[in-house]
Image (tube, rainbow, N blue to C red):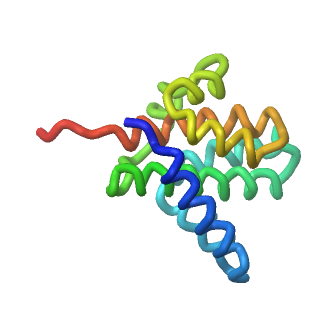
């Protein structure tokens, strides 16, 4: 399943408009932390590598945008993501891998994130979110 460019564009447009609301970014970050506590811990552990707490909040905000793209594309909540799933999404050239699997998501990252380390980190999260969005077989 690929997230379409139309979905990414709609989410990005909505986010851009909502950024005018004084509490929107705070709510978006809080929503991600609540929905994905292990991903949030992972990002927090990268504080020094990203350049400080503000960069971590920036990463969490964009991760929530990515999560919303996957939610909209699947019309469903995403599965829980823990460290096992995050490890499964690890590997070299994550941005390249994401570009092949989810070009619209990779394009969003490339267009909105300047720092290469943050791009790679968000690509890693994008791959984990993609796996969480995959249809699950019923038991």
Front-most of 98 and 59? Answer: 98
The structure residue drawn at horizontal position 75% and vertical position 55%, both measured from the top left corner, is 58
Residue 13: percent from the left, percent from the top?
A: 62, 64
Total label count?
Answer: 0
Q: Quadrant of residue 93?
A: top right
* Residue occupying the point 62% across, 59% down: 12
Question: Toward the viewer: 68 or 42?
Answer: 68
Q: Quadrant of the C terminus?
A: top left
Q: Point out residue 96 in the picture as x, y percentages from the top left corner.
A: 64, 22
Please, which residue is most extreme toward the bottom here?
A: 22
Give me the residue at 25% from left, 39% from top: 136
Answer with left or right where residue 14 lies relative to residue 139: right
- The correct choice, above or below, for 93 with respect to 8 in the image is above
Quarter holding the N terminus is top left
Q: State the residue at coordinates (49%, 53%).
A: 7
**Can you say whether 28 is above or below 119 in the image?**
below
Image location (x, y in percent) of residue 41:
62, 48
Q: Is residue 68 left or right of residue 42?
A: left
Q: Residue furthest right?
A: 51
Q: Is residue 49 left or right of residue 17?
A: right
Residue occupying the far left of the picture: 139
The spot of residue 36 in percent (x, y) is 50, 53
Q: Is residue 26 above or below residue 51?
A: below
Please state if 76 lies on the left or on the right of 116 as rendered: left
Q: Nearer the viewer, residue 40 or 130?
A: 130
């Amino acid at each position: 399943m690929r997230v379409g460019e139309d979905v990414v564009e709609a989410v990005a447009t909505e986010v851009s408009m909502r950024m005018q609301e004084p509490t929107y970014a705070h709510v978006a970050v809080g929503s991600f932390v609540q929905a994905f506590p292990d991903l949030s811990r992972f990002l927090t552990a990268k504080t020094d590598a990203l350049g400080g707490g503000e960069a971590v909040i920036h990463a969490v905000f964009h991760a929530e945008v990515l999560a919303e793209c996957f939610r909209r594309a699947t019309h469903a909540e995403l599965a829980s993501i823990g460290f096992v799933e995050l490890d499964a999404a690890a590997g070299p050239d994550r941005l390249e891998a994401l570009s092949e699997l989810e070009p619209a998501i990779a394009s969003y990252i490339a267009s909105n994130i300047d720092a290469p380390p943050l791009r790679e980190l968000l690509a890693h999260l994008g791959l984990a979110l993609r796996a969480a969005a995959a249809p699950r077989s019923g038991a």
